[in-house]
Amino acid sequence: MRSRYVVRISPNDVGRRVTVRARLRGAEGEPAATDTVGVLRSWADGLLEIERRDGAVTTVAEADLLAARVIPDR
């Protein structure tokens, strides 16, 4: 059985807590992904900014999204 990734967030979810799995740009032919959990602070010009619990902001390109969803607040 294979997993199916689904992106279930949109720009309307700015301000909500999300979890995002995104493709890493690395060596060609090597599948790699990273997960980020935090508050979606912005989604503009194809870039998402997610503020993690430690206050660091991660930028993710919309084109690199593999899966994403809104999650409950802590």
Image (cartoon, grey):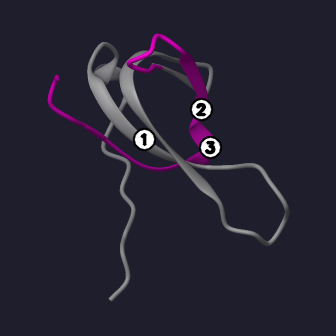
Q: Looking at the picture, which amino acid does disc 3 mark? A: Ala
Circle 2 sits in a helix, a strand or a loop, which is it? strand
Screen quadrant of the C terminus: top left
Identify the residue at image location x=36%, y=56%.
Answer: 6
**Residue 47 image offset from top left, x and y in percent:** 60, 25
Q: Looking at the picture, which amino acid does disc 2 mark? A: Val
Identify the residue at image location x=28%, y=24%.
Answer: 17
Looking at the rendering, the stretch of residues picked out in magenta corresponds to 51-74
Residue 55 lies in the magenta stretch: yes
Identify residue for label 1.
20
Q: Looking at the picture, which amino acid does disc 1 mark? A: Val
Label 3 crowd bin: few (<14), some (14–19), many (20+), radius 10 Å:
few
Q: In terms of depth relative to the viewer, which is nearer, 47 or 28?
A: 28
Q: Earlier in the sequence, mark 1 or mark 2?
A: 1
Circle 3 or circle 2, nearest the eye:
2
Which disc is residue 63 wearing? 3
Pointer 3 and pointer 2: residues touching (CB < 8 Å)? no
Q: CA distance from mark 3 to mark 1?
A: 12 Å
Identify the residue at image location x=62%, y=20%.
Answer: 45
**Residue 48 image offset from top left, x and y in percent:** 53, 24
Screen quadrant of the N terminus: bottom left
Q: Is residue 23 left or right of residue 56?
A: right
Q: Is residue 31 left or right of residue 20?
A: right
Q: In terms of depth relative to the viewer, which is nearer, 2 or 13?
A: 2
Identify residue for label 2.
60
Label 2 crowd bin: few (<14), some (14–19), many (20+), radius 10 Å:
many
Residue 45 lies in the magenta stretch: no
Image quadrant where residue 51 sits: top left
